[in-house]
Amino acid sequence: MTDTVAAAKGMGKEVAGAAKKELGKMTGDHTLAAKGQFEEFAGHAQRDFADLYDPDETRMEATTTFIQERPFVSLGIAAFIGFIIGRLLLRRRG
């Protein structure tokens, strides 16, 4: 069963992120482009997660199922979040 509200929100977040990313590329604003990329990726993950939604399942069970069924997407999400956090921390130091 798909949670259509979560899927629609994910799609909206994905589209808004893609627009921000492209606007950042066009204007040369790397921060906006990175934020847009992150938002686009988060929306895509939210849509994928909505496909796994089961109303009788807890969030922890749903997360575990998502990681087991999509290990490479999960790894990509973790790596991307780590990359963004690293960039933000390095900017503050410099």
Image: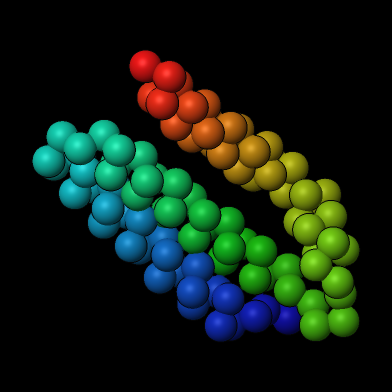
Front-lying residue, 76 or 87: 87
Task: Name the residue: 67% across, 79% down.
Answer: 2
Point out the image quarter for the C terminus: top left
Counting from the top left corner in percent of width and height, residue 31 is at 30, 38
Q: Is residue 76 visible?
A: no
Left or right relative to 30: residue 59: right
Left or right relative to 16: residue 69: right
Judge whether 31 appears above or below 67 on screen. Answer: above
Front-lying residue, 19 or 86: 86
Counting from the top left corner in percent of width and height, residue 28 is at 15, 34
Q: Is residue 40 visible?
A: yes
Counting from the top left corner in percent of width and height, residue 41 is at 48, 50
Task: Name the residue: 13% across, 41% down.
Answer: 26
Quadrant position of residue 71: top right
Counting from the top left corner in percent of width and height, residue 81 is at 56, 39
Judge whether 76 appears above or below 8 on screen. Answer: above
Instruction: Specify the farthest residue to the left.
Output: 27
Task: Name the residue: 50% across, 68% down.
Answer: 10
Left or right relative to 81: residue 22: left
Instruction: Specify the farthest residue to the top.
Output: 94
Point out the image quarter for the N terminus: bottom right
Task: Name the residue: 26% across, 34% down.
Answer: 30
Front-lying residue, 6 or 88: 88
